[in-house]
Image: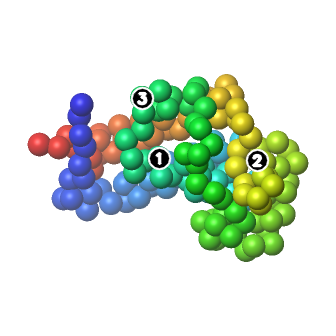
Amino acid sequence: MTVLSVDNEQATANSRLAALRLTTLTLRWMENWRRSVSDYDSAMILLAVVAITAGRLLRSDLEPELRNMANQLPEGRLARCNFSSIAAATGLNRETTRRKVRELVDAGFLVRLQDGSIRFPLGYLQRPETAELVRRQLDTLTRSVNELARDGVLKPLA
C-alpha cells in the first residue's frame, strides 16, 4: 500500500494550485450529495446524520462483514442523533434544522424514532443509489489526489 504525505516545499510553491484543487474537490463532493436532495442545507443535514450516527465506527476495529455497506449495521452500533446535534454539526439554526429534517423525513431520506432521535431508514444505505454516490465520491477523490500528486504537493511517504 502506498502512503502519501504532503511535500511542504511543493505545497508552498504550488499553494494556489493546491487551494484550487481542494476547493474543486469540496464543491464536487457537495454537488454529488446535493444531487439526491433539493438543496445544500439538506445535503449538509444528511452528511451530519451519517457523521453523528456512524462516526464512532471509525474509532474502533470494525468487523470485516460490517465494513461493506451491503450489510446492515446492528442498531446498537449507531449513536443517537437529534436536532441539536445536527444544528451544531451543520451550523444551521435549530428552526431551519427542524424544518429541513421534517422535509427529509417526508421524502423518505430520514426517519424520526419514538425517542425523538433521527437516522436513516432501515435498508437506506443498502440501496443502489447509495453505493453509486460512494463510487462517485471515490472517483472525485482519486482524481483530486492524482492531480495533487502530479503537482508535487502529495508524494509517497519515504
Q: Earlier in the sequence, mark 3 or mark 2?
A: 3
In percent of width and height, residue 140 lies at 50, 38
Residue holding disc 3:
64
Q: Amino acid at mark 2?
A: Leu
- Residue drawn at (65%, 59%), measured in percent from left and top? 81
In this view, the residue farthest toward the left is 158
- Residue drawn at (47%, 27%), measured in percent from left and top? 65
Q: Earlier in the sequence, mark 3 or mark 1?
A: 1
Given contact means CB atoms under 8 Å apart, are the residues at marks 3 and 1 in contact? Answer: no
Residue holding disc 1:
57
Is 77 positioned to the left or the right of 149 in the image? Answer: right
Q: CA distance from mark 3 to mark 2?
A: 26 Å
- Circle 3 packing at 10 Å, graded few (<14), some (14-19), many (20+), is few
- As drawn, the label of residue 110 is 2
Q: CA distance from mark 1 to mark 2?
A: 20 Å
Q: Nearer the viewer, mark 3 or mark 2?
A: 3
Query: Observer-nearest residue: 11 or 81?
Result: 81
Q: CA distance from mark 3 to mark 1?
A: 12 Å
- Residue drawn at (72%, 54%), measured in percent from left and top? 118
In percent of width and height, residue 74 lies at 59, 38
Quarter of the picture holding the C terminus: top left
